[in-house]
Amino acid sequence: MTPKEHERGQHPNAKATSNVRQELECFNKLVVRMQWSLAEALAGEVGMSSELDEMARTLFNGYIPAI
């Protein structure tokens, strides 16, 4: 911990924790959206839309889709 961080009461991993929290928030939004879309598709309310197709393609390529 640097002296400035100690003076401000900041933990040395505060920035990393903040970044992880932001990533988790985005991932949680994505999971909720996927759950909602999957529930609709299984209920027969919608087919595989272009949005769902793009989401699947993005996940297959190892990226996080835009929400």
Image (spheres, grey):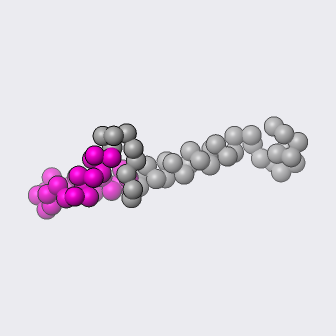
Residue 18 vs 49, above or below: the answer is: above
Residue 2 rendering spot, x and y as whole percentages: 84, 39
Which residue is located at x 69 percent, y 40 percent? 13
Which residue is located at x 39 percent, y 44 percent? 63
Q: Main secondary structure of the magenta part?
A: helix
In the foreground, 48 or 8:
48
Left or right: residue 2 versus residue 42 is right
Q: Examine the structure image and report whether residue 41 is included in the region drawn in magenta.
A: yes
Magenta-colored span? 30-58
Residue 47 rendering spot, x and y as whole percentages: 14, 57
Which residue is located at x 56 percent, y 45 percent? 20
Residue 39 rendering spot, x and y as whole percentages: 21, 54
Which residue appears farthest toward the top when viewing the image?
A: 1
Examine the image and state in which quarter residue 43 appears.
bottom left
In the foreground, 44 or 58:
58
In the foreground, 8 or 67:
67
Left or right: residue 57 versus residue 26 is left
Residue 64 visible somewhere in the drawing = yes
In the rendered image, the quadrant that contains the C terminus is bottom left
Residue 35 visible somewhere in the drawing = no
Which residue appears farthest toward the bottom when viewing the image?
A: 45
Left or right: residue 52 versus residue 10 is left
Residue 29 rendering spot, x and y as whole percentages: 41, 55
So how many labels did they put on this image?
0
In the rendered image, the quadrant that contains the N terminus is top right
Which residue is located at x 23 percent, y 52 percent? 53
Q: Examine the structure image and report whether residue 20 is included in the region drawn in magenta.
A: no
In the foreground, 31 or 55:
55
